[in-house]
Image: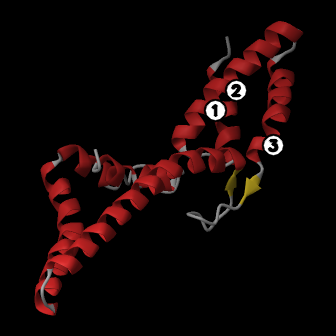
């Protein structure tokens, strides 16, 4: 079993590598488990076991660019996780875009003149604005996700994924 000070040392190490909160908690659990395993198997103290664990995780904490959504550098492990998560979001966005395009083509064939088509197109575009507003108004969980938390100003690193989670939940 590790002490609170040792656990805090692991947490500080992960914060130093700018991990977002959700990833930090998951990696912290894995690192603690690995430190305990190394201590038990190799009969080492905490410092030596923690140093070995740091060496094993070193490649995951190297900084890299992910130009798709981040302008600053992020750890490789965050890039891998964000890629997986954004893949699903982008797939849904492409599907919604294709549906919108097909509806637009349908409007072209159904409208007899320019004025009718303009009205139908305005109605479709208003739905893209009004749907998220109505979802936000009538869904109390959504308001909780969008609200800013000023308690941890610039002390916790939220991923773009975490910041945009409310918009994803609105699709369900």
- Please tell me which of labels 3 and 1 falls first in the chain: 1
Nearer the observer, 16 or 161: 161
* Furthest residue toward bottom: 114
Cα separation between marks 1 and 2: 6 Å
Position of residue 38 in the picture relative to residue 32 (left or right): right
Q: Crowdedness of circle 1 by 10 Å Cα count: few (<14), some, many (20+)?
A: some
Q: Is residue 11 above or below residue 30?
A: below
Instruction: Assign a secondary structure to mark 2.
Output: helix
Instruction: Assign a secondary structure to mark 3.
Output: helix
Nearer the observer, 28 or 135: 135
- According to the picture, the residue beneath numbered tag 2 turns out to be 31
Q: Crowdedness of circle 3 by 10 Å Cα count: few (<14), some, many (20+)?
A: few
Q: Are marks 3 and 1 in contact (CB under 8 Å)?
A: no
- Quarter of the figure with residue 60: top right
- According to the picture, the residue beneath numbered tag 1 turns out to be 27
Residue 127 screen position, x and y as percent = 18, 68
Residue 83 screen position, x and y as percent = 59, 50
- According to the picture, the residue beneath numbered tag 3 turns out to be 59
Position of residue 113 in the picture relative to residue 40 (left or right): left
Camera sees residue 158: no
Nearer to us: label 3 or label 2: 3
């Amino acid at each position: 079993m590790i002490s609170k000070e040792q656990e805090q040392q692991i947490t500080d190490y992960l914060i130093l590598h700018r991990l977002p909160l959700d990833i930090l908690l998951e990696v912290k659990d894995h690192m603690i488990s690995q430190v305990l395993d190394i201590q038990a198997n190799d009969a080492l103290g905490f410092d030596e076991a923690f140093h070995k664990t740091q060496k094993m995780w070193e490649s995951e904490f190297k900084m890299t660019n992910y130009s798709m959504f981040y302008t600053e550098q992020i750890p490789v492990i965050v890039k891998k996780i964000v890629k997986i998560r954004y893949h699903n979001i982008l797939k849904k966005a492409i599907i919604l875009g294709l549906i919108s395009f097909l509806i637009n083509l349908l409007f072209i064939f159904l409208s007899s003149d320019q004025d009718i088509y303009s009205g139908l197109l305005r109605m479709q575009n208003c739905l893209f604005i009004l749907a998220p507003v109505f979802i936000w108004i009538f869904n109390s969980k959504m308001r909780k996700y969008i609200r800013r938390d000023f308690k941890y100003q610039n002390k916790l690193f939220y991923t773009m994924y975490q910041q945009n989670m409310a918009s994803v939940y609105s699709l369900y």
